[in-house]
Image (cartoon, rainbow, N blue to C red):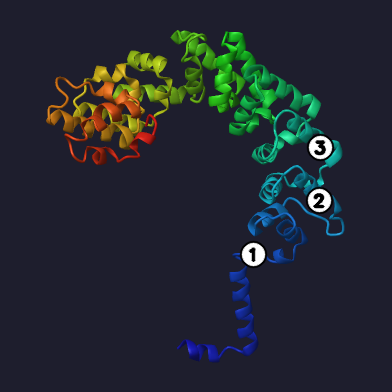
Amino acid sequence: MSTHMNSNIPLGNLLSLIQKRFLKTSSTTLPPNASSSFTVQYLVNSCGLPQQSALSVSKKFQIDENNTQKPQSVIQFLKSYDFQDAHVAKLIEKWPAVLRSRTEGNLKPKFDFFITNGFVGQLLPQLAVLDPRIFRTSLDAHIKPCFELLKRFLKSNENILTALSRAPFLMSFSFNATVRPNLDLLKKQGVTVDRVAKLLLSQPRSLQHSNERMVYAVSYLKQLGIEPDKRMYIHAITVFARMNESAWRKKIDMFKSVGWTEEEVLWAFKRYPCLLLSSEDKIRSMMDFFLNKMKLERQTIVTNPALLKYSFGNRVLPRCNVLKVLKSKKLIKGDTNIATFLKLSEKDFMERCVTKYEDKVPGLLEMYGGVDKGKDGNG
């Protein structure tokens, strides 16, 4: 039937239909005229961008085909500072306007500053790709003061490199608006330099919260009696600053729904702040397992809040299985304190509960997880 219908379509109309069908299917992969766009071709051939990335960049940035000397000089400049092709492509994806930058008067002094301060080899290209905004700021008015402030807390270039590799925003536009005021706030509260340094190195993103939010967090921790000189203060402020009042209330209510009192939740938070970052599903499933399967007392869980944060599949279940077997064979006698065994380091648990009884319980190591289990750290 379709053959009969096609035979009645004039040849000219049939060709037109075929052409439209071809254009329709082609446009799903490449917009009309994109293949002839000089900017796209240049970004792909000279800068190493993938086709789709080049198409995306070309919508907001154009290169004059009669004036490619400038972008070419920028590319050569970057490569003279050990930027590999992948670095160049990624930098242009994130910051196309770098191709119009003044190399000698703008980029070079900034690059040289970082190299002088330890960003040698691939570290400078990596930093530029992580957050190009750093190099769009003033060297004297922004970069140098930021660097000096970070150095005041972190002391060494190595620590600064570590912090920036985790959070390059520490030296980008948000620094003066958020990071600096938050650092000043913590210092004013009496948080020691070494604890601020720990925060910068381990949880730098907590300093991205608005100063208003951090002031509120500081005030609330003071109400709870968590003093700035306490070891858990940095962890507590990191956790609390991430949640608004509604989210905080909801988290406490969730714990109350599985049998905790509010006083117990706050007590646990003071001692193990990151407990409050656990998802509702995880808390419910872990409480169910410990109470109903392992017959732990609720108070045992409350006084050992870290139990609820451990990995169920990698730590809790394998260890409980091992303990169950050892107890059934009377190799562990008396009332087994599961919490104590779960809190052991991987190395200690392996030595005390697995390798010690391998000869007496064939297959114990395999049941626990194999010879690589001891390499998982603390689980």
Q: Is residue 29 above or below residue 351?
A: below
Residue 136 coordinates in the image, percent (x, y): 76, 36
Q: Which mark is residue 30?
A: 1
Decide: few, some or many residues near mark 2? Use Cα within 10 Å; few <14, some 14-19, many ≥20: many
Quick check: can you spot residue 97? no
- Res. 49 image quadrant: bottom right
Q: Nearer the viewer, residue 99 or 267?
A: 99
Q: Which mark is residue 141?
A: none
Which marked residue is nearer to the observer: mark 1 or mark 2?
2
Whole-Å distance between the Cαs marked 2 and 3? 15 Å
Name the residue tied to disc 3: 108
- Res. 335 image quadrant: top left
How many numbered dots are placed on residues in this image? 3
Q: Nearer the viewer, residue 246 or 95?
A: 95
Asked which secondary structure carries label 3, the reply is helix
Horizontal side of residue 278 vs 362, given as left or right: right
Q: Looking at this rendering, what residue extends furthest in the front direction?
A: 359
Q: Is residue 287 above or below residue 47?
A: above
Residue 204 coordinates in the image, percent (x, y): 57, 26
Q: Earlier in the sequence, mark 1 or mark 2?
A: 1
Name the residue tied to disc 2: 71
User: What residue lies at 86% left-to-right and 53% top-to-bottom?
Assistant: 69
Asked which secondary structure carries label 2, the reply is helix
